[in-house]
Image: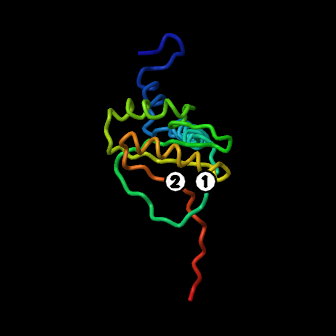
Amino acid sequence: MADPVRGRTVTQLKHRYRPMAEINVTPFVDVMLVLLVVFMITAPLLTVGVKVDLPSAEANVIQGTDEPLTVSINSAGQIYLQESPIVLPDLVPKLRAITGENPDTRIFLRGDKEINYGLVMEIMSAINSAGFSKVALITKMPFTIESEE
């Protein structure tokens, strides 16, 4: 039986056009590399918050399983709850609303090393007097080189 278009039989066409048994992974690798580059670029941007130059201190790492709330004070003295700017009188009501009046919520207080210590203590006092007992001051871990003896 001949093909009316090209003059070939069906058996000749079957042998010439066999299905390919190999999988072409080149498009898959291309897509994965593009996704890798996208995530490498966006991941550092997701962790950026309020710009605070933390002081260094030697202290133990705070352990915990829950996600703490962060109150930050930048070098200009502006207060932030997480990444949202806030004024001091509104801080305690917002904390109570977010935590659902749970006094065991961990709150991290980050203050720029150039700001007035009194402002840090004023904010810490307001948080503590609201009933939150788990308030921690966050510092930058010092860079230490251990000598070989």
Q: Nearer the viewer, residue 94 or 120?
A: 120
Q: Position of residue 100 (x, y in %)?
A: 32, 32
Q: Which mark is residue 54?
A: 1
**What SS does tag 2 mark?**
strand
Label 2 environment density (alpha carbons within 10 Å; few <14, some 14–19, many ≥20): many
Q: Position of residue 111 (x, y in %)?
A: 58, 48
Residue 36 in view of the camera? no
Quadrant of the image containing the C terminus: bottom right
The residue depicted at 35 percent of the width and 42 percent of the height is: 131
Residue for badge 2: 138
**What SS does tag 1 mark?**
loop
Q: Amino acid at mark 1?
A: Leu
Q: Position of residue 57 (x, y in %)?
A: 56, 64
Would you say 59 lies left or right of 116 here?
left
Q: Nearer the viewer, residue 23 or 34?
A: 34
Q: Position of residue 78 (x, y in %)?
A: 62, 37
- Outermost residue, bottom side: 149
Q: Amino acid at mark 2?
A: Ile
